[in-house]
Amino acid sequence: MLDFKELEAFVWAVQLGSFRKAAVRLHITQPSVSERISRLETTVGELLLERSARPIQPTMRGREFFLHAERMLHQRDEALKLFDSKEAFSAPLRLGTIETIAHSWFPVFMQRLTERYPRLIIELTVDYSPVLNERLMSNELDILLAMNGYLSPEQIEDGALSPYEMGMFVAPRHMEMLKESGDAWCRTLPFISFGKQARPYEELLRYLAGQGVKQPRIHSVSTLMTIVRMTIEGLGIGALPVATVLEEWRRGDLCRLALPEPLPPMHYDVIWRSANHPRFCRSVGRLAQECASHYANARLAEMTATHFTGRWVQPNAAFSTPQATPPLL
């Protein structure tokens, strides 16, 4: 089996005409150069160098083999450049994300990613976190922007992304009805949430149970935009990531419930298999973290600076004073 170190010793010995000069070029000893070339000649079964000549000359077969050896080393160097120059990465990136991220900071992330890697081709999948994690483990995806906790930590690397504050929203026409009694929010309207496979659905169930709502009516919906639309149309109380509906809330298309306790925030990660291209994946992961953090800070500043007067629903008996400035995004 050919060894690149043996090929290098042979090629430099031919080019420089000396074992000594080849040793200096390769930063090894002269006997090491001689030993590597001898192993190469044993592998191919023929002498490749005329050692008695000064300077050293390749044999007839050695001249022919030199052309192939030189080309093999050049191809090796070209292949290794992929790992030295991140911008040269050109393989398709099979990227998976959840819909909440797809409808928030993901477009900016995509723009910056393709600017950094101009030859990159993206194959995007948007789905629930459990499905994405399963596809990552079966090597159908390379990197995820999703909820973690589905895969063995020994098999993956990951980095935390900025969390999303969750809130409950209703159509303006339900405001008066919900203000009439303290428990109207949990006994009058159904809730609208992500599909049952999604962790936000499980979190909503646990939250409502903690508020004494044991058998809530929940419409499970597969897409974020459909939840928003159904909530605007007055079909129920939407449990939504606050940052993704700021415009609808500001315009008055949605009103936010002042809850007795905040909903738990949604935590996401950037995840990849440990066996994947580590330097590239870490670079993509850091970029995702930067984009997520910038988005979260911008939305927090927007909510701090913007007055949502008249956009809160505070039932008389049930709720405390609403949060004017939510703590998380």
Image (spheres, rainbow, N blue to C red):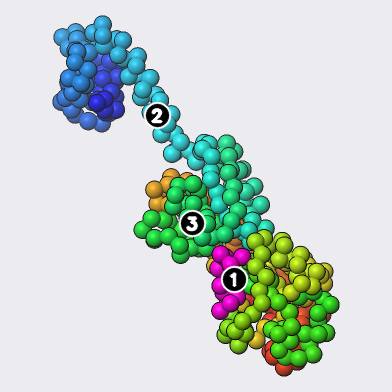
> How far across and down, in percent of the image, does residue 105 sit?
64, 57
> How far across and down, in percent of the image, does residue 78 sit?
43, 29
User: In the rendered image of this protein, does residue 105 appear above or below residue 85?
Assistant: below
What's under tag 1, amino acid-wise?
A: Tyr
Q: Secondary structure at mark 1?
A: helix
User: In the rendered image of this protein, does residue 40 appear above or below residue 299?
Assistant: above
Q: Which residue appears farthest toward the bottom when viewing the image?
A: 317
Instruction: Please state which of the two labelled residues, at mark 2 or mark 1, is closer to the viewer.
Output: 1
Disc 2 packing (10 Å; few <14; some 14–19; many ≥20)? few
Disc 1 packing (10 Å; few <14; some 14–19; many ≥20)? many
Q: Earlier in the sequence, mark 2 or mark 1?
A: 2
**Residue occupying the point 66% across, 64% down:** 221
Residue position marked by numbered label 1 in the rendering = 201
Does residue 14 appear anywhere in the picture? yes
> How far across and down, in percent of the image, does residue 173 sit?
84, 77
Q: Which residues are magenta?
A: 195-206
